[in-house]
Image (spheres, rainbow, N blue to C red):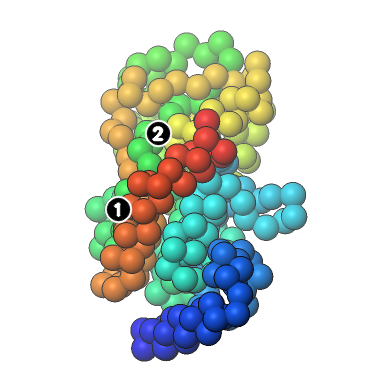
Amino acid sequence: MKKLLAMLMAAGLCMAVLAGCGADEASADAGSQASGDRPVLVVGTNAEFPPFEYVGDDGEPDGFDVALIRAVADRMGMDVKMENMEFGSLVSAIGTKLDAAIAGMSITEERLLEVDFSDEYYEAVQFVVVPAGSDIAAPADLEGKTIGVQLGTTGDSIASEINGADVKTYNKALDAVNDLVNGRVDLVIIDKNPAEVFEKQFSGQVEIIDGAQFEFEPEFYAIALPKGSEMIEKVNAALAELKADGTFDALVAEYIQ
Ligand code: GLN
């Protein structure tokens, strides 16, 4: 597999060199979707986590993470094929169905047993989403509550450790927030940026509280790769380049802020 990749990349390079004889545009076009001869990185995500990933108007995954992995792969001379799947299935599919996953996925000790992570690219923290006017404010207020979370997430782990909590799991974060609005759960624990998106989407119906108020620890998103993957250095080099040349900040401005 690695050999094949190396051969394909070498072939791509030869073609770029050949193309360079006649047309400078050929290399300028290399980042576009048009080039069908580049190796393909199959990347899993769960497009239920705006603004990092959601289903775009064309029915395909879009969002910050999707744009970021396309930019990373482009620096590696590769195209990307996104696979939209349940969040809880991503880690086990890496190395079999998937070459990598990008899904606002926080680095955790548990996941590190199964996959390797790139350098972190975003700091997050879990937020608490409550119905407007709720008096939930301190860690003790979370005890004994019915808590909605996305299955297999760090929010799920945090909720499961709260005393007396009845944890309801969802495949789609939006379904958890809908159940909050309908009174089926008392609160939802989800990452900061999606919480902010839902606050706008359900304006006047929900409020959000910074998880720091509940002593939730910061988390760091990274790209997940198969254990022992040699691609990790290239991914990290591409990430560093994108940060250094302003591409990363431009994506943050476009999708997150
Ligand atoms: N950051 C959280 C985690 O890694 C949630 C990710 C998500 O729902 N896409 O578990």
Picture layout, residue 103 above or below residue 174: below
Q: Residue at coordinates 34% horizontally, 20% vertically from top-left? A: 213
Q: Residues within 10 Å of mark 2 (few under 14, many from 20)?
A: many
- Residue 240 drawn at (x, y percent): 33, 52
Instruction: Kindly identify which residue carries mark 1.
Output: 119
Disc 1 residue type (three-letter): Asp
Q: Residue at coordinates 45% horizontally, 32% vertically from top-left? A: 192
Which labelled disc corresponds to residue 221?
A: none
The answer as to whether callout 2 falls within 8 Å of ligand 1 is yes
Q: Residues within 10 Å of mark 1 (few under 14, many from 20)?
A: some
Instruction: Kindly identify which residue carries mark 2.
Output: 126
- Residue 96 drawn at (x, y percent): 44, 77
Front position in the image: 212 or 160: 212
Q: For numbered disc 1, what is the local secondary structure?
A: loop
Give me the C-alpha separation between circle 2 and circle 1. 20 Å
- Residue 38 drawn at (x, y percent): 54, 77
Q: Residue at coordinates 66% horizontally, 28% vertically from top-left? A: 201
On screen, residue 155 versus residue 206, left or right, reads left
